[in-house]
Amino acid sequence: MSFKPSLIAAAHCDLPCGVYDPAQAKIEAQSVKACMEKYAASSDPDFKSRAVSIKEERSNMVKEHLWVLWTDYFKPNHFEAYPNLHQLFNEATKLAGAAGTKGTNDVAVAEKLISKIDEIAEIFWATKK
């Protein structure tokens, strides 16, 4: 006899706890930027390889945190009140992807990502008032 769940639910913490904060994405984006800076400052190929690996891992984490906000926190009324919100998330997740921080060591791209997260955070905190 095997037991199978009749309903499967998922949330960023599998509760769902209702705790959301764009700071999680920003911290990871700042880590991405720091990895890029350390990469540029090093001449050690092993260190550089580790920096790239960590940068790519953190870039994925940025996307995960943004997706949670986009899909779990923000509701239709938020998207109505802030019509550019979908576009901001699209741009931010792309900046954390292969065409963004995963695919380059250019600190300027990481800075654009952080700036985009800041724009999302501004809207997020406005919705909490």
Image: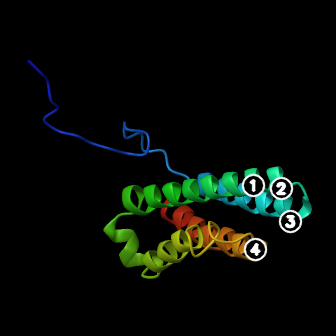
Q: In the image, what residue type sits under mark 1? A: Ser
Front residue of 95 and 2: 2
Determine the secondary structure under disc 3.
helix
Considering only order in the chain, which callout, 2 or 4, is on the residue closer to the N terminus? 2
Colour style of the rendered protein structure: rainbow
Q: In the image, what residue type sits under mark 2? A: Pro
Residue pictured at 37% horizontal, 41% vertical: 16
User: Could you tell me how far apart the alpha carbons at marks 2 and 1 are, in whole angstroms?
Assistant: 6 Å
* The quarter of the displayed image where residue 114 is located: bottom right
Disc assigned to residue 45? 2
Residue under numbered circle 1: 49
Residue pictured at 61% horizontal, 73% vertical: 100
Say whether residue 22 is visible.
Answer: no
Considering only order in the chain, which callout, 4 or 3, is on the residue closer to the N terminus? 3
- Closer mark to the observer between disc 2 and disc 3: 2
Residue under numbered circle 3: 40
Disc assigned to residue 1? none
User: Could you tell me how far apart the alpha carbons at marks 4 and 2 are, in whole angstroms?
Assistant: 18 Å
How far from the left and from the top, in percent, is residue 15? 37, 36
State left or right for residue 50 relative to residue 39: left
Q: In the image, what residue type sits under mark 4? A: Asp
User: Could you tell me how far apart the alpha carbons at marks 1 and 4 are, in whole angstroms?
Assistant: 15 Å
Q: Residues within 10 Å of mark 1 (few under 14, many from 20)?
A: few
Q: Are marks 2 and 1 in contact (CB under 8 Å)?
A: yes
Number of marks present in the image shown: 4
Say whether residue 123 is visible.
Answer: yes
